[in-house]
Image (tube, helix red, strand yellow):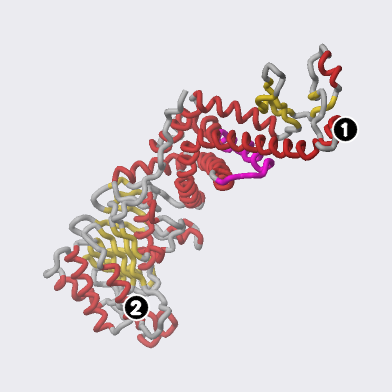
Amino acid sequence: MENKAVIPEQILKKTDSDMFFYEIQSLNFPIPDISSYMLIDPKEIEERQDIFRDIYNCPPLLEKYEKLDEQIGSLADFFTKYGDGDINDNEAIIYSLIKMNSFTETIDYIVSDLYQLTLDSTIKARDMVNFINACVSISESEFYKNIKSWLDKLDDSLKNIKSVTLGVNLDVNFQVREIGITTFNQSPYVSAGIVDSIFRDENPGDEYKCMISLGVKETKRLIGKNIVSVNNEIFSAMNAVFKGVLKKVRRDIIDSFRQDAVAIINIKNDISFIIHASRYMLSIQRQGGNLAFPNVSDCHKIRNLYNINLLEKCQRKNIVANDVDMDADNRIFILTGPNSGGKSVYLNSIGIAQIFFQLGMPVPASSAEMKPFRVIATVYVKNIDNINEGRLADEVIRLKKCLQNLDNNSLILLDETFSSTSAFDGVFLAESLIKYLSDIGCCAFYVTHFHELAQRIEELNKDIKYRIHMLTAQNVDGKRTYKIGPYNGFESETSLAKDIVIEKGLGFLFE
């Protein structure tokens, strides 16, 4: 019976080529190589969430996926070493035949350890269930049962093979017309003599008996020295035939399951990503961090958002959480306030949550509604390698590259943009940038020490498409609270330089 089951080409949907990510590494995101796994389609995000929700609700499931990853790794190693190469060493050929069971072991693991978890709804994610069911269907086919039975017997016999029984077909004149391999044996043959072998009544035991050896010494003694060279040629030919038979058996078996094996190998990257992301997700859970699977929406309403990078630095109870509200009409935010007040931490938490969300993972918050973006970009202050270029020039070059890709389905996070120039020039440039972002219609959070912008917001809002909202890192009695809230005009509007002077101990100059 031919195998009709088809292994899905992938478990996880991949990124639309139109998506754009710019300098998101600035967020210190803890999971590498995420770009191809970011999603924008709401349905695909919800399907991805189901995969992580299964693991979040049943953490031991991660161990099952780790074992699956290990099994697929063994199968991939087999194909790398033996899948297509021409092997000429008999020992290597036999070893590669034995290692073919890496395919059946992978299928058997899926059937024995994962299939039941789909039946009891531990695994609910549709894409994972489809993959497991396809493997189960393969395991139930005659094709698979036959190949598994053959490989199981092969595994038992080839590991200890000591002799091969050759069958010789004769014509009516007792002339040899065909020689073939009939059995692989786990005991070497022994010579029992011609008469004994012809007339014995008992069946052979564990030792395989022959009438006469065709070894060089024996044939030389019986027939003469002239036969030795011929005998050597016979041995050489038989070795070639034996090797050819093994190679053909190996090739035919590999070809019979190649398509299914390659399909399973192809999903290894997906499984590895699920494992890596889930490990981090569960580590947040173990550290007491709240996590919530966002509802896909056309706005942002995140409650008690926090920066996951703080979990390693301080206890969860000491981390200050904040809210994020953003919709179609409210999409431009300027965040100001004193140094070390939590502005950049807040900015990073928004970016990290957005990436988590578009990976299908839960976000570090108590609840969330979120909108996916085609573009996620950050432009942060950074040290430059070419001091001759200048920090402002470097910043402008990077900003230009970013702005060229923005549209009304973009999120950009700006940290201290234009802070390398004077306050007068910086405010002018910042206003121009904000107007441009408003005209595009993208969503933007702009952290700045240009407090003068607060005095200009009312005027700016008269001439731009989307209203600017001022936020501030709030103080109470001169102490930082790390809470981000609306700017109400009472916060200190000090300059960046004055903030630094006070921060470093010269606050008495202003008393």
* Mark 2: few/some/many CA within 10 Å (<14, 14-19, 20+): some
In the rendered structure, the answer to whether residue 31 lies left or right of residue 405 reads right
Rendered location of residue 179, percent (x, y): 67, 27
**Residue type, label 1:** Arg
Is 399 located above or below residue 229 in the figure?
below
The residue furthest right is 221
**Residue type, label 2:** Asp
Rendered location of residue 45, percent (x, y): 33, 46
Front-most of residues 18 and 244: 244
Which of the labelled discs sits on residue 221, or is there none?
1
Stretch of the chain drawn in magenta: 85-105
Q: Does the image show residue 441?
A: yes
Rendered location of residue 109, percent (x, y): 55, 34
In the rendered structure, the answer to whether residue 476 lies left or right of residue 437 reads right
* Mark 1: few/some/many CA within 10 Å (<14, 14-19, 20+): few
Q: Is residue 79 magenta?
A: no
Which of the labelled discs sits on residue 394, or is there none?
2
Q: Does the image show residue 63?
A: no
- Determine which quarter of the picture holds residue 126: top left
- Determine which quarter of the picture holds residue 217: top right
